[in-house]
Amino acid sequence: MIVVERVRRRGAALEEAILQAAAEQLIESGYAGLTMDAVAKRAGTNKNALYRRWPDRLALGIAAYRQIARTVPPPDTGDLREDALEMLRRANRHWSSPLGAILRELLAAAGGATARLTDQSADAMAAPWLIILGRAIARGQASPEALHPRVATVAMVLLRNEFITRGTPTAPDDALVEIVDEVFLPLIRNRSPAR
């Protein structure tokens, strides 16, 4: 008789298994179908292991969403305006994709607590924009004063506002152009030192 010992996962290995199970559940069933029971069963653990790491299903859903949302390198067209437009167009496409639908469900579930979705990912959201601005500075298209996280992310914040206030899964391209031409680029130029 062969005895198979079940290896008990702990720490990072268990957390990874739980996040993978939650991500699969989100993709299959959306946030509405994400339950602690289903995730625990899929991960081969118990609910207590989930609750020790995430206080509720929304927190787990947010962590799982971050697990499946892939980071794509920022565009490098050689022009700040075109890079910014491409970043917004990518975000716009993502918002209307199946992953974007999951994000919209999570935002709705978070209600007024949208900071739960954005606080931990603020650095992640700023990073590609800071890269784009850094390249623009190197090309002489912006001054070093423009390299600030709040300045860098203003275009993305305005796009997110379009989604939230209009309640649509996509923004028209002219809104993206307006965000870049009427807000983002003037803000970058105004942060430049006097010539």
Image (cartoon, grey):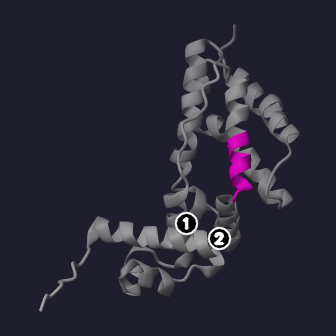
Magenta highlight range: 89-97
Name the element at disc 2: helix
Dominant secondary-structure state across the stretch colored magenta = helix
The amino acid sitting under disc 1 is Ile
Q: Secondary structure at mark 1?
A: helix
| Residue 166, position as x, y percentages in the image | 85, 57
- Image quarter (top left, top right, bottom left or bottom right) of the C terminus: top right
- Which residue is disc 1 drawn over? 62
- Residue at 72%, 48% (x, y): give it: 93
Q: Are marks 2 and 1 in contact (CB under 8 Å)?
A: yes
Label 2: few (<14), some (14–19) or many (≥20) C-alpha neighbours in 10 Å:
some
Q: x%, y% of residue 186?
A: 77, 26
The residue pinned by badge 2 equals: 110
Compared to 49, does 155 lie above or below?
above
Residue appearing at x 57%, y 79% in the figure: 34
Single out the residue that lies furthest toward the front.
1
Q: Is residue 128 left or right of residue 171?
A: left
Q: Position of residue 165 (x, y in %)?
A: 83, 58
Kindly identify the residue that appears in the image at 30 percent across and 67 percent down: 13
Q: Judge the density around disc 1: few (<14), some (14-19), many (≥20) Cα neighbours within 10 Å.
A: many
Viewer-proximal residue among 2 and 140 = 2
| Apparent side of residue 100 relative to residue 44 in the rendered image (left or right) | right
User: Can residue 90 be seen from the camera position used here?
Assistant: yes
> How much space separates mark 2 and mark 1, taking CA atoms?
10 Å
Q: Quadrant of residue 19?
A: bottom left
Choose the circle earlier in sequence order: 2 or 1. 1
Where does the image place residue 22, in percent across and percent down from the top left?
A: 49, 72
* Residue at 84% across, 40% down: 173
Q: Can see residue 147? A: no
Type of the residue with mark 2: Ala
